[in-house]
Amino acid sequence: MGDLRAAGVEPYPYRFDRSHTLAEARSTWGALDAGTETDDRVSVAGRVMLLRDTGKLVFATVRDRDDEIQLFISKAVIGDDGFAEVKELDLGDWVGVDGHIMTTRKGELSVKADRVVLLSKAIRPLPDKWHGLSDTDTRFRQRYADLIVNAEARRHFEVRHAVLSSFRRTLADEGFIEVETPVLHTEAGGAHARPFTTHHNALDMDLYLRIALELHLKRLIVGGMERVFEIGRIFRNEGISTRHNPEFTMMELYQAFADWTDVMAITEKLITTAARDALGTTTVSIRGTDIDLSEPWPRISMVGAAAEATGSDLHPSMPVADAARVASDVGVSVHPSWGAGKIIEEIFEATAESTIVRPTFVCGHPVEISPLARVDRNDAHITERFELFVDGRELANGYSELNDPAEQRARFEDEQAAKEAGDAERGTVDEDYLRALEYGMPPTGGLGIGMDRVTMMLAGVDSIREVILFPTLRPEA
RNA sequence: CCGCCUCUAGCUCAAUGGCAGAGCAGUGGACUCUUAAUCCAUUGGUUCUGGGUUCGAAUCCCAGGGGGCGGACCA
């Protein structure tokens, strides 16, 4: 570094004006015949990824975010001083280049450089140029290095961005308004999960990081906002696995005057459109099977699927002891606080869930496990609720929203009783939410989609860490 | 929290109880059409950490740490 400055080279200059991105250069001149010289001048910038030094002629491959191009650096063109500086370049350095567009005898699009300026010196070596970086620990801890050398890692986050922007576009087209609601909650409601706790010093009070977006968004439906959505980080203080990261991204939407059937339709539209936008096709490979997302997604009953898997009659209205007997037949252990509805869900999860490959709506969850969902208009023991499963994983959850404040209070009280009976994930009575319902919430359909898992499906990866830039890890030793 | 697997040079990997090595990167040199350029030379190690067994440990044993997978947990 001192040598560079002594030689009059600033290793960290302030800025560089480029005339073309590398993708723009390729789209403009990519069709030139081999062996073409042009008078077209460009200024481009990128990171040096490969160097091929043949003496008085150096080839370099530089890359910007979207493309690569070759630099053709001739000592006779650039001059002795400039060439001496080029000889000092290392893999990983950022450079700005002025020159003319040309193609080599083999047809490689190149910039014949007459000036190469160092934009930032890399003093740490790049991972192996051929094998890249494969150690997962290093890949996730040093995501910057992973992104530099692994095109597949870059692709995962391109898919993620495409999915997120596609969702926003679709929702805007459907008249939804994007909102932001608090991350710090005084009560952790809207889902069954253990929250993270934190502390506010000035107020001297404990707060929870949100485990769902639901209850605030529905307050906005009460307020008359009609169609709202939020894409936001939520936090669950639970185990880490290939499907779970403690902080993850949820999209939730609420639509006034709609019910669960409308919400199922928009779920299909959101995900199918995202596939088209991210991949250019609605066909995805799931466990080696090509599945066209544009075909209607099957709808099955949770209770029915559990009954079919066990070969026994099941219904949440049945005596708990009977449900528990079926559960023990299939090796599901039953907690004493559980009712028949919870037991049926556990049976479903233990038997049918992992067999679902293609996108499938699992419908009609028992009331017991659905404290915010509206009772089915044809069966008082189940709700108008669905979960979307793909490849054994839950991707989405939606329902006709319970808007009767008296019934909601009774459901909350059941939750609180279960919590006090020792079930830590159960909820509490949210008095402000009940007050909101008392002002009147129109009939509403609601939906939550796990954005990380949608990205996993579309990117074709098996671990959630592949679609989260900085997944949660223990501190480095 | 439990089980299995794993950790060797900056990176990717060898060495299975007997002198810690290779390729790439780095360094020095040659080369004006290369494509992972090539060729010659060369630097580089707390073998994750600590303890033990052994004449001798990267290798076997114990404890700890990081990571992966599975389980537990997790609408």
Image: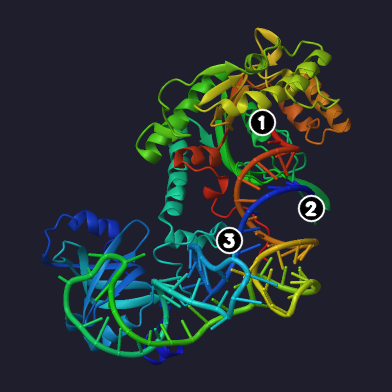
Task: Choose top left, top right, bottom left or bottom right for residue A66.
Answer: bottom left
Mark 3 or mark 1, whichever is nearer to me: 3
Front residue of A93/B55: it is: B55
Front residue of A172/A270: it is: A270
Tell me the distance, in whole angstroms, between the alpha carbons under discs 3 and 1. 39 Å
User: Would you name the residue on which mark 1 appears?
Assistant: A219
Determine the residue positioned at 46% across, 41% down: A460
What amino acid type should be assigned to the residue bearing mark 3?
Answer: Arg
Give the secondary structure at mark 2: strand
Determine the residue positioned at 73% across, 45% down: A237
User: Would you name the residue on which mark 3 appears?
Assistant: A141
User: Would you name the residue on which mark 2 appears?
Assistant: A199
Task: Choose top left, top right, bottom left or bottom right for residue A273.
Answer: top left
Q: Do the residues at pointers 1 and 2 share their chain?
A: yes
- Counting from the top left corner in percent of width and height, residue A299 is at 54, 17
- Counting from the top left corner in percent of width and height, residue A441 is at 66, 22
What amino acid type should be assigned to the residue bearing mark 2?
Answer: His
What amino acid type should be assigned to the residue bearing mark 1?
Answer: Arg
- Counting from the top left corner in percent of width and height, residue A88 is at 35, 83
Q: Chain of mark 3?
A: A
Q: Is residue A238 visible?
A: yes
Mark 1 or mark 2, whichever is nearer to me: 2
Q: Tags 2 and 3 in contact by the CB under 8 Å rule? A: no
Q: Residue furthest bottom?
A: A6
Position of A87 relative to B35 (above/below): below
